[in-house]
């Protein structure tokens, strides 16, 4: 009896590192990154800052930590409030970390099926100064939006939310776990797509296929504060160049393949729809 092939569709996080990634990890020049001395980490962070059009970047163990650090940098006064989608990853899947660890109050706005939040509802959610209310300091978006079927937020929408944030003296953070997928799908360079954002988290172990890690990007002042919080949260790692080397290969080798990934996903979705209809 012929053996059946198993196609693992749990998540893009279960891809295995390529031989090129493993070779890069073995050959990586390393030093103590907590002391700011790991050359591979420094080169990779500079590369990611340049790709995203931001001043600086910081490697972190996970996207959850990247989002948490970003929110806490922007909401550095306990009792601050962040506006975010009611179906967003930060609100649903990150263990309530912004409140339990950072003392940040979440003000949720309904996510539309396309992952957006109505801009008028965002504006309405911004608190006016009042001793009864927390102080609004941040708006969070997610692109692509996981719980909304991986929908992409357009650059026009992000720019509009960025204008709202700026006009009210707020910061804008983008949970960009799959921001490169959004960039490819929309045909918009990633630096332009996140131009309005004060900070962005980018997952390296999802669509890009690295074995572990995320990176957060923003201004140099933002990253300086983020480094302190990374250490506080236990995310300061030593010879992290071993991981950054794999992430570098993932960015180098995978970005050009994302369009083909999207094509294959559409074909797969078509077959799933077809066979579901047959069996129903």
Image (tube, rainbow, N blue to C red):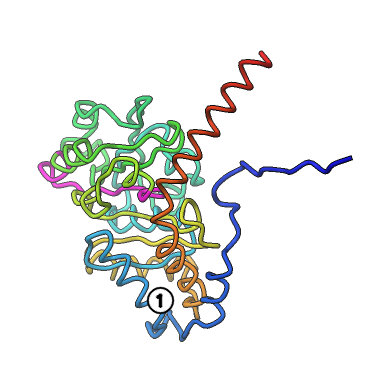
Q: Is residue 59 highlighted in magenta?
A: no
The stretch of residues the image draws in magenta is: 164-180
Residue 266 at what x, y percent from top left? 48, 34
Q: Is residue 115 above or below residue 210?
A: above
Q: Is residue 201 above or below residue 280?
A: below
Taking the image as shown, residue 131 lies to the left or right of residue 142, namely left
Q: Quadrant of the N terminus?
A: top right
Residue in the foreground of this view, choosing between 225 and 63: 63
Residue 251 at what x, y percent from top left? 41, 62
Taking the image as shown, residue 231 lies to the left or right of residue 272, namely left
Residue in the foreground of this view, choosing between 96 and 41: 41
- Which residue lies at the image location 36% right of the left edge and 70% below the top edge? 227
Assign a secondary structure to mark 1. Answer: helix
- Which residue lies at the image location 33% right of the left edge and 46% below the top edge? 184
- Which residue lies at the image location 67% right of the left edge and 43% below the top edge? 7
- Which residue lies at the image location 39% right of the left edge and 56% below the top edge? 255
């Amino acid at each position: 009896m012929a053996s059946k092939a198993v196609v693992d569709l749990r998540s893009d996080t279960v891809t295995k590192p390529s031989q090129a990634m493993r070779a890069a990890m073995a050959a990586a020049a390393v030093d103590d990154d907590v002391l700011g001395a790991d050359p591979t980490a420094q080169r990779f962070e500079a590369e990611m800052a340049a790709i995203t059009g931001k001043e600086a970047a910081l490697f972190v163990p996970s996207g959850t930590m990247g989002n948490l650090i970003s929110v806490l940098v922007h909401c550095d006064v306990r009792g601050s409030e962040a506006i975010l989608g009611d179906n967003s990853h930060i609100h649903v899947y990150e263990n309530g970390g912004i409140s339990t660890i950072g003392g940040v109050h979440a003000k949720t706005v309904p996510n539309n099926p396309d992952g957006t939040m109505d801009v008028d509802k965002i504006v309405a959610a911004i608190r006016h100064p009042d001793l009864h209310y927390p102080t609004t300091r941040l708006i969070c978006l997610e692109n692509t939006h996981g719980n909304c079927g991986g929908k992409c937020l357009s650059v026009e929408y992000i720019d509009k939310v960025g204008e709202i944030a700026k006009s009210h003296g707020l910061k804008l953070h983008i949970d960009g776990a799959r921001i490169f997928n959004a960039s490819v799908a929309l045909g918009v360079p990633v630096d332009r797509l996140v131009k309005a954002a004060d900070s962005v988290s980018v997952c390296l172990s999802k669509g890009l296929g690295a074995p572990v890690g995320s990176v957060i990007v923003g201004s140099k002042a933002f990253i300086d504060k983020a480094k302190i919080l990374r250490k506080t949260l236990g995310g300061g790692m030593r010879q992290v160049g071993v991981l950054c080397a794999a992430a570098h290969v993932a960015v180098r080798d995978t970005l050009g393949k994302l369009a083909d990934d999207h094509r294959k996903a559409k074909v797969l979705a078509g077959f799933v729809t077809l066979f579901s209809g047959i069996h129903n």
